[in-house]
Image (spheres, grey):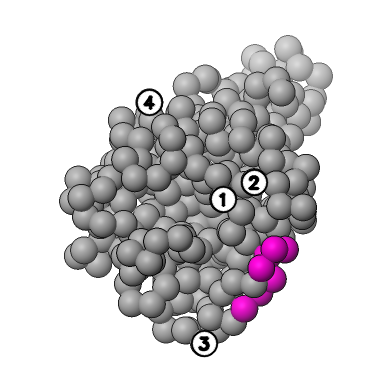
Amino acid sequence: MIRRPLAAAALALCGVGAVACGGAEVSDSKAAASGTAPRLGRPAATQDGAAGTAPSETAVPTTRTAAASETEALPLAGKVVVIDPGHNGGNFRHTKEINQLVGISNQKKACDTTGTSTNDGYTEAAFTWDVSNRLAKLLKAEGATVKLTRTRSTEWGPCINQRAAVGNKAKADAAISVHGDGAAANLRGFHIIMPKKIGGPVDPVVKDSARLGANVRDAFHSGTGLPYSNYIGKQALNYRSDLGGLNLSTVPKIFIECGNMRNAKDAARFKDSAFRAKMARSLAKGLENYLTSAR
Ligand SMILES: [Zn+2]
C-alpha cells in the first residue's frame, strides 16, 4: 500500500503500526518463484535446437547462429523491465533507517515504509517479493532483461529514490512497482497508480506511463477477475504526484495495488499461491502488450 496524504482515516488504516506503503525502488535478483514459467500465450522458438547434433544442423550454419535467432524470436527480446517489489521484510525492524527523509523532486518523504499485511499476518513485503519474482521469471522466458530493485526480502529499504534510480540506470522500457493496499476492511479491488507532470524528472514519461497503466489494468482485470477498486480512482486508474518511485522515474513506470489486503475476499486471493501465479501471469501479459504495441 502507499501512504496517501489526504485522508487521515486512510493514513491510519495504511499499515501495521506506523507507516505502511510508500514505494521505493532498487537491484537484481535471481530468486526464483515457485513453479514453472508458463509462457504468455505464444509459443517461443524452440529452446532445444541450439545444442543440436543432428538433423537440424543441416538447416542452420552454426549453433551460434541458431541460438541467436532463437533469442531474437522471443517477443520481449531486447526489452528491459525493472520490477520493484514494494517495501522489504526487514523494514519493521529498521524504523530509523526507513524514516530518513529523501527528496522526491517536489517534496521530501520517508525513505520507505513498512507496508501493510493481511489481518492474519501475511505481509505486503512477502507478497510483493513473491509476485515480483514470479513475474521476473515469466518475462525472462519471453526474452526480456529483468532487474529487481531489491535482492532479498529480509532486510530494509532500499529508499524510494534508489528504487527509482534502478529503473533509470537500466534505461528500462517499462518499470512496475508491486504493492498490496491496506484500506478499510469493507473496501476492495485493485488499482493502478500513474505519475502526473510535476515539473520534474518524470514529466517526459507521463504519457507512456499512462499507456503502460492502461495495458496492465486491462490484463490484470481480465486475467485475475479481481474487481476494480471501489475506493480509489476511476476504473482502477489513479494518478499521483507524491510518490518518489514515480516522480523520480525517467522511464515509463506505474505502481499496482493488487487489492486490499485488509479485505477478507482480497486477502484470500493474496494468500493463495496459485492465485499469485495468476496475478504474475496477468502482469506479464499487460507488460508484454505494452512493450509490443505501437505508440
Ligand atoms: Zn505498499
Q: Which disc is residue 222 wearing?
A: 4
Q: CA distance from mark 4 to mark 3?
A: 41 Å
| Tag 2 residue | 196
In this rendering, is residue 1 above or below 231? below
User: Residue at 59% across / 71% down in the picture?
Assistant: 109
User: Closest to the observer: 143 or 149?
Assistant: 149
**Mark 1 and mark 3: Cα distance apart in space:** 26 Å
Which of pointers 4 and 2 lies earlier in the amino acid sequence?
2
Drawn side of residue 189 relative to residue 105, left or right:
left
Q: Is residue 250 visible?
A: yes
Q: Is mark 2 within 8 Å of ligand 1?
A: no
Front-lying residue, 17 or 35: 17
At label 2, the amino acid type is Lys
Q: Which mark is residue 96?
A: 3
Q: What's the residue type where badge 3 is placed? A: Lys
Quadrant for residue 219, please give it.
top left
Q: Which residue is rendered at x = 74% and y = 35% of the image?
A: 78
The residue wearing badge 1 is 240
